[in-house]
Image (spheres, rainbow, N blue to C red):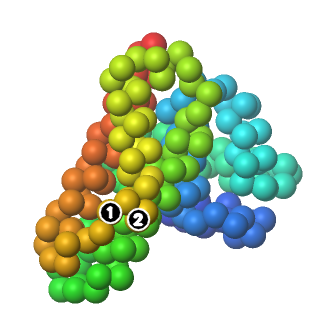
Amino acid sequence: MNKSTLQAINQIIDTDDCPFTQFEVHGFFIGLLVSSHSKESRKEKIIKFLDLSSNINTKKLIDELSNTISQELINQTLSVYSSMNDDSEKSSELESVANSLSEWAYYFLIGYQDESSLSDIPEIQEILDIFDEISQINQKYKFDGTKSSSQESLDEINSFIVKSTLYLYERRIND
């Protein structure tokens, strides 16, 4: 996530003591933004799902985050996480990154749901199926113990998420 996106997410989380993580909020917002929900429908879903108050300040924060993420999609600068430091050998850090990707994918799917018209397209359904698999990383997969191969795998998953999300966004814009 870029700095401005992270700041906007933190403001939303802090405003109403939102119980979700940064990655959960980011994934949920992007799922909604690449879906074909109307702006008002997205805002209502965000307020209801994230259990936020529906005051003017909260709606302004939602608009700011939506605009920031939309710019990432338009400019193709979307990122879920940044690569870790090469000198880090902690397996817990790898597990943290895997957990972040898992949370992001799970909440993306929640935000994207109810998009039956696009979900019937085989390419889109395949992406959603893979996102579902990514959301279960920590339950189904174990790290092999080598930091470099595990990091490489996580980087590939991150790259797939970014490219697929941009593809879904382009499909929505062009349909």
The image shows residue 96 at horizontal and vertical percentages of 40, 74
Q: Relative to the observer, which residue lies in front, 168 or 123?
A: 123
Distance in Å between CA atoms under marks 1 and 2: 6 Å
Q: Is residue 32 left or right of residue 120?
A: right
Q: Relative to the observer, which residue lies in front, 78 or 125?
A: 125
- The residue wearing badge 2 is 138
Q: Is residue 90 left or right of residue 44?
A: left
> Against 141, is 90 above or below?
below
What's the amino acid at mark 1?
A: Tyr
The image shows residue 53 at horizontal and vertical percentages of 84, 55
At 28% from the left edge and 53% from the top edge, which residue is drawn? 157
At 55% from the left edge and 58% from the top edge, which residue is drawn? 24
Q: Local crowd at mark 2 within 10 Å, few (<14), some, or many (≥20)?
A: some
The image shows residue 86 at horizontal and vertical percentages of 17, 79
The image shows residue 155 at horizontal and vertical percentages of 23, 59
Do tag 1 and tag 2 residues touch (Cβ < 8 Å)? Answer: yes
Residue 141: assigned label? 1
At 40% from the left edge and 37% from the top edge, which residue is drawn? 129
